[in-house]
Amino acid sequence: MPLINMPEFAGALLDEFAARRTARVDTPVIQPAEPFLDMAGEDLRRRIFMTESETGQSLCLRPEFTIPVCIRHIETATGTPKRYAYLGEVFRQRRDGSNEFYQAGIEDLGDTAIASADARAIGDAFGVLARLLPGESLKATLGDQAVFESVVKALGLPAGWQKRLIHAFGNGEQIDQILKRLASPNPLVGLDPALVALLSSGDDAALVAEIDETMRRTGYATNVSRTPAEIAARLKEKQALSQTRLDGAALLLLREFLSLELPLADASAALAGFADAAGLNLGSAVSRFDERVAALANLGVDLQAITYRAAFGRPLDYYTGLVFEVAISNSAAVLAGGGRFDRLLTLLGAKDHIPAVGFSLWLDRIETARAPS
């Protein structure tokens, strides 16, 4: 039985979902914890309520719906494209103390028309909120992880630094720390001088042999899952990262990109101007961005109500492209948020690549916004 009351506007919400030709779906409250721990991101991982089965399997209370809906889709071998809608309780620690609350949303799986599917997700979020909050002016913030990844790759950073930057997308503090390290690289410290010398020599065989001998001599070999060769490869990667320095011009370019914030109607021209001035080839990511903007305009979505912020991301690791949040114009409270997660279903076990996009609605915040002032 629910521990909190269903919002009184739930009926209107379900009507909206039905009008958008979605299939209502539910998932168990108790979920296997591993997919969330592996794929949801640090922000959600540290707020999950964990438990375990009688056999010792790690379980958790359902902290969100996207992963369970995708797992159910795979397990039922349902074909695509498929549009799902959900409404139910989720459980996770929040700063305001409300650890159980209702979420609803739409997951759009398998539509290969990427730009139009992205635009539909944003348009649906606006449309549902307009029905639930009549008369309110809505605003959205939009980011694009794929564009950010294209900028990072075009700057020619080593793969290790690219991975770190992409993983930190949306976290301004982490990005700033990484950029400071790239501006002033620090050598590896605490390593045995013999290992340092072998790393510098480029003699991989001797490096692996030295690590193997050290592990045998100290007894470490019986208590570690990684082989000497794997440890050597990791040390070489750390050395490369510690010695990498991004020149001042490239750092300025990356900071300039991350500072972009303007109405979505002007964003395509701004990205093209940035790429031209910087001499960067951003490839298909910008083309897809432009196609999405055009698709939104074709849907009649007010582009002036959407702000593109190049540094904007959402704290879930499975996003791959579009990310967005919607709020009331005079409020900071996020009422809806979502994005594209094209790799998630494959990671969860789908045999075929299934593109996906969706959004969630925070019903307790919507309820607060509906209350008479």
Image: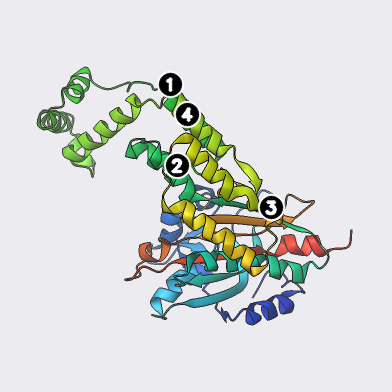
Near mark 1 (Cα within 10 A), the count class, few <14, some 14-19 or many ≥20, is some
Q: Spot the residue most to the top.
A: 193
Give the percent coordinates (x, y) of residue 363.
70, 65
Residue at figure coordinates x 64%, y 57% from the top left: 99
- Mark linked to residue 151: 2
Residue at figure coordinates x 66%, y 72% from the top left: 2
Q: Earlier in the sequence, mark 2 or mark 1?
A: 2
Label 2's element? helix
Check contact, mark 2 vs mark 1: CB within 8 A: no
Q: Spot the residue most to the right.
A: 373
The CA distance from mark 2 to mark 3 is 39 Å
Quarter containing the C terminus: bottom right
Residue at image mark 1: 184
Front label number (2 vs 3) = 2
As shown in the figure, which amino acid type bears the numbered disc 1? Answer: Ser
Colouring used for the render: rainbow
Residue at figure coordinates x 47%, y 69% from the top left: 113
Residue at image mark 3: 97
Q: Is residue 334 visible?
A: no
Label 4's element? helix
Q: Is residue 258 visible?
A: yes
Q: Nearer the viewer, residue 299 or 239?
A: 299
Label 1's element? loop
| In the rendered image, the vertical position of residue 277 relative to residue 126, given as above or below | above
Q: Earlier in the sequence, mark 4 or mark 1?
A: 1
- Mark linked to residue 68: none
Front label number (4 vs 1) = 4
| In the rendered image, the vertical position of residue 48 relative to residue 31, given as above or below | above
The answer to which quarter of the image holds residue 198 is: top left
Residue at image mark 4: 251
